[in-house]
Amino acid sequence: MATALNLSTIDYILECDKELDESEQTIFLLKPLSAAQQASIQDAIEVVGDATTVKNFGTHSINLLKKGLVGWKNFKNASGDQLKFNNSNKDANINIMPAEYRYEIAGKIMTLSTNTDDEVKN
């Protein structure tokens, strides 16, 4: 049976935070991409035989974050101060995120945008 994508915003906890107490975990708010946004992102993907290549991987990840990262909770700077999510300047949000976080979150946004609820949970 065909199943539609779930277009709801989800809470996402980084793999490195999952072992922490809930009060210490950072929660990133993610939403799936629209069909047009997916198409734009997928234009950077090239499939040759059995291999998939992503051209300009860094830019690809940034574009996913700009479109799919819609907020966060409990994200702190080195001094322990809560960081506010800047809805009007996506670059400011992305610039303070370590690369490993950006890549993990970008991958999750892509998964949300291409899989059904059951596939996303696995």
Image (cartoon, rainbow, N blue to C red):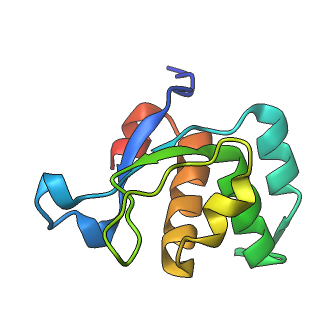
Q: Nearer the viewer, residue 113 or 103?
A: 103
Residue 104 screen position, x and y as percent: 49, 68
Q: Nearer the viewer, residue 11 or 81?
A: 81
Residue at 68% x, 39% y: name it.
33
Q: Is residue 114 visible?
A: no
Q: Is residue 96 left or right of residue 28?
A: right
Q: Is residue 20 left or right of residue 5?
A: left
Q: Is residue 89 above or below residue 101?
A: above
Q: Is residue 6 above or below residue 47?
A: above
Q: Is residue 80 visible?
A: yes
Residue at 25% x, 58% y: name it.
25
Residue at 57% x, 79% y: name it.
99
Residue 95 screen position, x and y as percent: 65, 71
Q: Is residue 78 left or right of residue 62?
A: left
Residue 107 screen position, x and y as percent: 56, 62
Q: Is residue 3 left or right of residue 93?
A: left
Q: Is residue 79 above or below residue 42?
A: below
Mark count: 0
Residue 29 screen position, x and y as percent: 47, 43
Residue at 84% x, 45% y: name it.
39
